[in-house]
Amino acid sequence: MGEKKFDNRENLIIEIHNSITHGIGAVLGIVFLVMLILPQIRNHNLLGTVAYSIYGGCFILMFLMSTIYHAVQPPKIKAILRIFDHISIYYFIAGSFTPPILLLTSGNFRIIFLILIWLIAIFGTVFKIATYKNYDKLKSISTLIYVGMGWLGVLLIRPILRYASWKFLLLLVLGGLLYTIGTYFYKSKRFKYNHVIWHLFVLAAAIVHFNAFYFYLS
């Protein structure tokens, strides 16, 4: 019984760290949203305002859902919150694609790519809800979908280099690498604080991508 109490206390400490790391992300998301949309509003840029409102909203949603999920401890409620936590990742990825798609592309490519990325997010939502009882078995598949969805960004290389800059592209790639490397810790059981480390990679990657948008696409 003593060992079980120690384990429970240790798990609680880990979950507190998880909540704090992504709680910081949720607060930063609010700040980032304001920083991104104010210049768009001042310049009467409707498309930019819409693009960054979607991005900022999805940013806040993901970090907020993660914070709530890790903060709540009753098992039944936590199991439900885990579904929403994981679903919000799809929308954050789609939301992160939205500014470069809307602001750097045009015509059929813009329409098709935007529809594709949001359809994947909707598919991910349905997939998570339909398979919530098989979470452990399908965890790797979910991770592959996240990573694959994120790296669809290679399709934006040409318009980025044409209408933005190589610095913007470099920051996007750096953020993508941080997310990808972080998945190793997400899946690993070798480290006691593996999920906290994963959270730090996600937070760092999100900050890198914000800087890309703020300095090179706003």
Image (spheres, grey):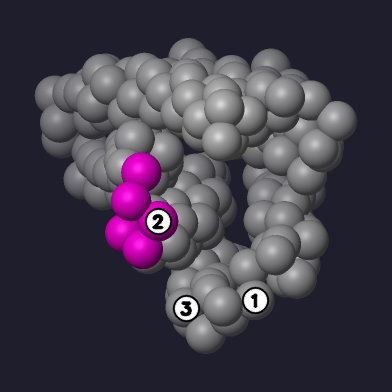
Q: Is residue 114 visible?
A: no
**In the image, residue 22 lies at what x, y percent?**
42, 27
N-terminal of the two: label 1 or label 3? 3
Above or below, 90 relative to 122: above
Q: Are circles 1 and 3 on residues that touch, CB within 8 Å?
A: no
Q: Write the residue at 75% across / 71% down.
A: 137
Q: Is residue 201 left or right of residue 185?
A: left
| Labelled disc at residue 180 | none
| Labelled disc at residue 75 | 2
Count of marks overlaid on the render = 3
**In the image, residue 88 lies at what x, y percent?**
43, 55
| Residue linked to disc 1 | 134
Residue 213 painted magenta: no
The local crowd at label 3, few if under 14, some if 14 to 19, many if 20 or more residues have their Cα within 10 Å, is: some
| Labelled disc at residue 129 | 3
**In the image, residue 151 lies at what x, y percent?**
75, 50
Q: CA distance from mark 2 to mark 1?
A: 16 Å
N-terminal of the two: label 2 or label 1? 2
Q: Write the residue at 78% across / 61% down.
A: 140
> What amino acid type should be assigned to the residue bearing mark 3?
Ile
Q: Is residue 176 left or right of residue 125?
A: right
State whether the magenta stretch is mostly helix, strand or loop.
helix
Range shown magenta: 73-77
Which one is in front in this view, the residue at disc 3 or the one at disc 2?
2
> What amino acid type should be assigned to the residue bearing mark 2?
Pro
